[in-house]
Amino acid sequence: MTTTQRFREFKMPDVGEGLTEAEILKWYVKPGDSVTDGQTVCEVETAKAAVELPIPFNGVVRELHYEEGATVDVGAVFITVDTEPGAGPETAAPAPAE
């Protein structure tokens, strides 16, 4: 992750008392969609229950790291969001000195 944290990675939280993984049942967003803090981005299922997960920041979805039906380990990045859309190239390098 960059130091400016333009691209924020959301990791699978522990959604149920020490469970180590969850299955993605449904995505409610796709790359290019705008998201706001608290917006539900997907539904996951653990051995105990189905849970909707809200994103903890604003931005534009850059990448969904797993397909529906995939099992994701707790702590694994499952979605990346650009928190500064329109800020220019992804790897903003300083202009070369002439």
Image: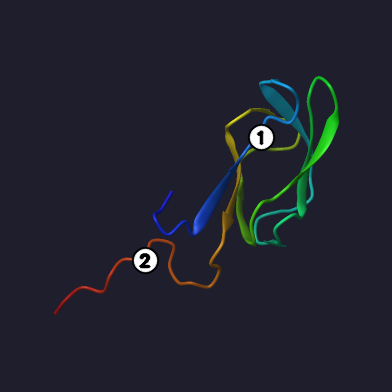
Q: Is residue 86 above or below residue 74?
A: below
> x%, y% of residue 22?
72, 27
How many residues crowd mark 1 within 10 Å: few (<14), some (14–19), many (20+)?
some
**Secondary structure type for disc 1:** loop
Residue name at image x 38 percent, y 61 percent: 91
Q: Is residue 43 above or below residue 40?
A: above
The C terminus is located in which quarter?
bottom left
Between marks 1 and 2 in the image, the one whose residue lies nearer the viewer: 1
Which amino acid, by three-letter code, is at mark 1? Answer: Pro
> x%, y% of residue 79?
62, 45
Task: Work out how far the residue at label 1 is from the one at label 2, CA to CA, in angstroms.
Answer: 30 Å
Which residue, as the protein is rendered here, is positioned at the far right?
Answer: 49
Residue name at image x 84 percent, y 21 percent: 48
Q: Of marks 1 and 2, which one's residue comes earlier in the chain?
A: 1
Numbered tag placed on residue 13 in the rendering: 1
Q: Mark 2 highlights which residue? A: 92
Residue name at image x 78 percent, y 25 percent: 46
How many residues crowd mark 2 within 10 Å: few (<14), some (14–19), many (20+)?
few
Q: Is residue 9 left or right of residue 42?
A: left
Which residue, as the protein is rendered here, is positioned at the far front?
Answer: 17
Which amino acid, by three-letter code, is at mark 2? Answer: Ala
> x%, y% of residue 58?
64, 61
Residue name at image x 64 percent, y 56 percent: 57
Q: Is residue 81 left or right of residue 98?
A: right
Which residue, as the protein is rendered here, is positioned at the far left?
Answer: 98
> x%, y% of residue 15?
74, 31
**Secondary structure type for disc 2:** loop
Please identify the quarter of the rendering in which residue 30 is found. bottom right
